[in-house]
Amino acid sequence: MSAGSGHLFVIGLGPGAAEWVTPEATRALAEATDLVGYAPYLQRVPVRPGQTRHASDNREELARARQALALAAAGRKVAVVSGGDPGVFAMAAAVFEALEAGEPSWRGLDVKIIPGITAMQAAAARIGAPLGHDFCVISLSDNLKSWDVIEKRLAAAADADFVLALYNPASKARPRRIHEAFACLRARKPPATPVIFARAIGRPEEEVTVTSLAEADPAIADMATLVIVGSSATRMISGCGPGRPFVYTPRGEGTRQ
Ligand code: SAH
């Protein structure tokens, strides 16, 4: 079979809750003959008879992308699954990296990226509208880039007064990085800056902590946590009822206050 007959969907499953999987993603998952992905993401997809599952380790992104492209080139309808959005620190870029470096015939494949709700959107929605004005998204994982680069980017984003959304804040292999990141931010931003730790959003173990840069305990961030650090304009509204305050960043930063 020619590569032209193969299909590759790169699908975002959203952050966890079933209602955050889009109808387009559900349709593509139902059409696929083969599912490829990190095992915990595959577990979130309902089992269908006749569909083959290829689970892999989280660190094997490029190998997984090549495997998916080879299956598609053999005429299969392949769905590569990612949590959140596949284009945000996830499989879509790995697929294009493998495609560019791979077999010339892979370029004839029908490759489609199916977007999902990314963790930062789900986390922001839980707490108000902290991303209402300019923001900057940084992964704190130094698996694929040096810590030096990460610190430079953090410092530049803090100095430019962006709201920050921090993915991959910590893992068992790098428990100290989040502390170093907070030291960098504390040296540059006001102590009262709102900080949100949004953990396992959309899953049963969901937990949201709202605090300030001065009082935040970075140790509570783990692999399932998304951290949002406000800009100088980010505000809290309390007294709106039981539970947490709202946190938001006004639309017209610097123009309305
Ligand atoms: N493609 C994913 C991100 C993958 S990187 C997306 O678009 O969301 C993995 C990181 O995403 C985690 O370390 C964490 O920072 C964040 N994350 C993923 N799911 C999350 C969830 N349900 N709640 C909070 N953070 C989450």
Image: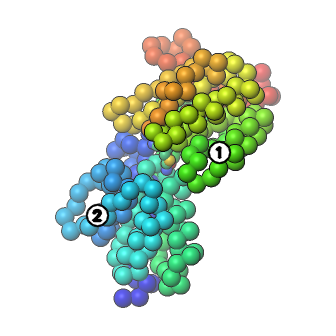
Query: Quadrant of the rendered structure where residue 254 is?
Result: top right
Residue 53's label in the rendered image is: 2
As drawn, is 212 to the left or to the right of 26?
right
Q: Secondary structure at mark 1?
A: helix
As drawn, is 51 to the left or to the right of 189?
left
Query: Quadrant of the rendered structure where residue 72 is?
Result: bottom left
Queried on whether the Cβ of the residue with tag 2 lies below 8 angstroms from ligand 1, the answer reads no
Residue 151 vertical position relative to residue 3 in the rendered view, above or below: above
Three-letter residue code for mark 2: Arg
Please identify the quadrant where the C terminus is shown. top right
Residue in the picture at 63% in, 33% down:
180
* Closer-to-camera residue (134/241): 134
Residue 173 in percent (x, y) is at 48, 42
* Number of marks present in the image shown: 2
Q: Residue furthest left?
A: 49
Asked whether the beta carbons under mark 2 and mark 1 sit within 8 Å of each other, the answer is no
Q: Secondary structure at mark 2?
A: strand
The residue labelled by disc 1 is 147
Residue in the picture at 67% in, 28% down:
183
